[in-house]
Image: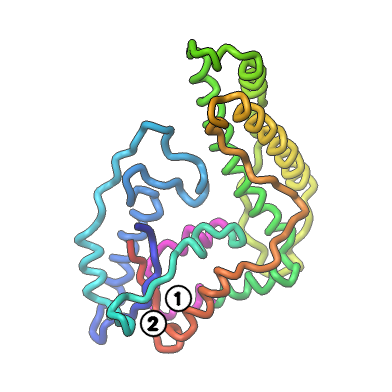
Amino acid sequence: MGLDYVPARPRPHADLDEVRRLAGIHSHHVQSGAARPGGWAPIEQYTMPECFVGEMREPATHPSSAVDRLRSQLEIVPDTNGNWPCFRVNVIAYNPLFPVSWRKAALTTMLPDEATESVDRWRRWYAHVTAGRMSHHLGHLLAWQAYQELLGIQAELIQRATATVSRTNAWAQRDALRQARQCIFDLPEVPPLNAPAPPPLVPDEDVPDAGRDEAIRALAAHINRVGEAVRDFNRAMPRGGVGRRPEPFDPAHRPVRDEWLEQFFDWIDPFLRTGHGLYLWD
């Protein structure tokens, strides 16, 4: 189960305005994070847990009627095995190399001209970042991902540590666990980080920001502190514990390439050349 792009193009007599309207209904549902039991977090906060363990959020009603009408307006040609060719939407929508607003906008069905425009924009941006340009904005995007992950990890960690307070097992009375738990309770809140602004239009507009850069350094230091707290808590818990450790974060690190993204570009090119857009299949 998941979200995929499927190459599709309007049928000869399709009403393009109606296609856009129906695609908008479907896209709104998907972007809200309500299309699966339990949901997933919105792109703006794409790694914050929607619910804690044991909770389930009721999914919103799937707009199946609109999706069926949308699909009836599109021509989807199976591959040689009789299957729809498809590629995971996550390659764009959950890719931290891309501006946040672009990721959210990727969760939609696109007509051929819209798909061509979007893919061209994604390609240009990827060419910039792999050439070392847009490094300040890219650093903010990567920090934003780390920040969102940390919000979820620290919340879960505090919840799990709190759950051990009332336990009467022998392991729950050990000094090592008490000390590890107190370190968790002593953690300050995650240092605030503003969401990334719209991306620069050209590399010359990508400039340093002293306040933003200081906030990112504070975030990196806090990630290290939380990582140590998780390590000590897991060691003190039976069977190695269950706490998630945050990924190490280096503010100076910039990824060089994304091979999965490059595979997507290679995959979509022949379809764009034959006049296909992208149908969002969920």
Pinpoint residue 52: horizontal percent, then vertical percent.
43, 33
- Look at the picture and state if 245 lies above or below 263: above
* Left or right position of 192 against 84: right
The range drawn in magenta is 100-119
Picture disc at residue 188: none
- Provide the major secondary structure of the magenta segment: helix
**Picture residue at 33% right of the left edge, 69% below the top:** 20
- What amino acid is labelled 2 in the image? His
Q: Which quadrant holds the N terminus?
A: bottom left
Q: In this view, does 161 lie above or below 25?
A: above
Q: What kind of residue is marked 1?
A: Ala
Residue matched to label 1: 115
Magenta region includes residue 113: yes
- Residue annotated with mark 2: 276
Q: Quadrant of the C terminus?
A: bottom left
Residue 121, position in %: x, y?
A: 57, 73
On whether residue 36 falls in the magenta region, the answer is no
Residues under numbered marks 2 and 1 in contact, where contact means CB atoms less than 8 Å apart: yes
Observer-nearest of 139 and 168: 168
Horizontal relation, residue 89 to residue 281: left or right: right
Where residue 21 sits, quadrant-wise, is: bottom left
User: At 25% across and 56% down in the image, what residue appears?
Assistant: 63
Instruction: Tell me the crowding category of disc 2: few under 14, some 14 to 19, or many 20 or more residues within 10 angstroms, Cα based.
Output: many
